[in-house]
Amino acid sequence: MTKPILPVAALPLALAVSMPASAALSLQALFDGDSLTVENALFDNWTLNSLTVTDPGQSVDLDQIIVSEVFGDPLRPGLSFDGGGQLRVSNIDFQFIDLDFSFTVQAINGADPFNYNGLIIDGYDLVSGDGGVQLEETVRASSGGTQLAFKETFVDTFLGDEQLNASAFFSPHSLLFVTKDVYVFNDIFIGGEFELDGFGQMFSSVPVPATPLMIFAGLGALAAVRRTRKPGPSKTRP
């Protein structure tokens, strides 16, 4: 059956729809040296750290993974990642895709330093069998330096478990070094066909008393996508 992913905790619609998408570039173009400026934030220095595809009959075209600006509030610049059908595993045997990359985000034009960021899985599709995704993000004050925040979102259809969003406050910094690992897999026992449709994130300069729900309002519009889940009772691993 088909279920929608609703905006996080019923985020205010007026805020969600005020954050339209703007310019977009492929992930490959960013790795080749392009950058994105969203409001008062510069997303730059994109680097592909590693890409592993275990299925010999499959490849991942980074030109088809599209990164779009999400804007509308200078305090909450964001990015939307559209998988473009590339983050998909399909086999009767266990297979996975592991994409690891990094970039910097810098406050520009005199903007306040960042002290918060959030991560959200926008949608996924389970066609057969079981599978899932694990999306991890580390934020540092410098390349290889002090870790400011670590977040993880995930879906595991075998276990019937998911955490679609995560967020963290940290000490204010005008330049952040971000590493992201995207791991998409099917079930180790029965295989399956599973796809990560996309994910989004936001970096914010906000007063500490502000609630994560307020900050995630800009990502709410991204979450109105559909996911397919296999009918049947919930399962637990032996």
Image (tube, helix red, strand yellow):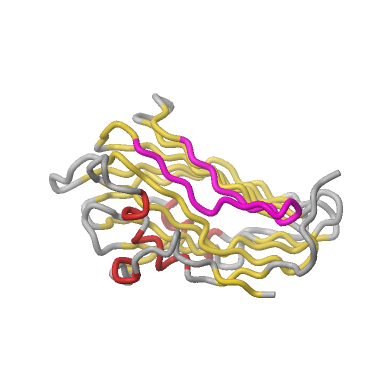
| In magenta stretch: residue 161 | yes
The correct choice, above or below, for 109 with respect to 122 in the image is above
- Rendered location of residue 60, percent (x, y): 62, 58
Q: Residue at x 28, y 57 (%)?
A: 38
| In magenta stretch: residue 145 | no
Horizontally, residue 158 falls left or right of residue 105, namely right
- Rendered location of residue 89, percent (x, y): 71, 59
Residue farthest toward the top in the current orientation of the protein: 146
Is 137 or 8 nearer to us in this picture?
Answer: 8
Q: Residue at x 38, y 37 (%)?
A: 177
Horizontally, residue 78 falls left or right of residue 157, namely left
- Rendered location of residue 235, percent (x, y): 79, 54
Q: Main secondary structure of the magenta part?
A: strand
Is 12 or 178 nearer to us in this picture?
Answer: 12
Q: Which residues are magenta?
A: 150-169
- Rendered location of residue 164, percent (x, y): 54, 54
Please state, as top left, top right, bottom left or bottom right, where the C terminus lies in the image: top right
Please state, as top left, top right, bottom left or bottom right, where the N terminus lies in the image: bottom right
Q: Residue at x 68, y 54 (%)?
A: 132
Q: Residue at x 32, y 48 (%)?
A: 211
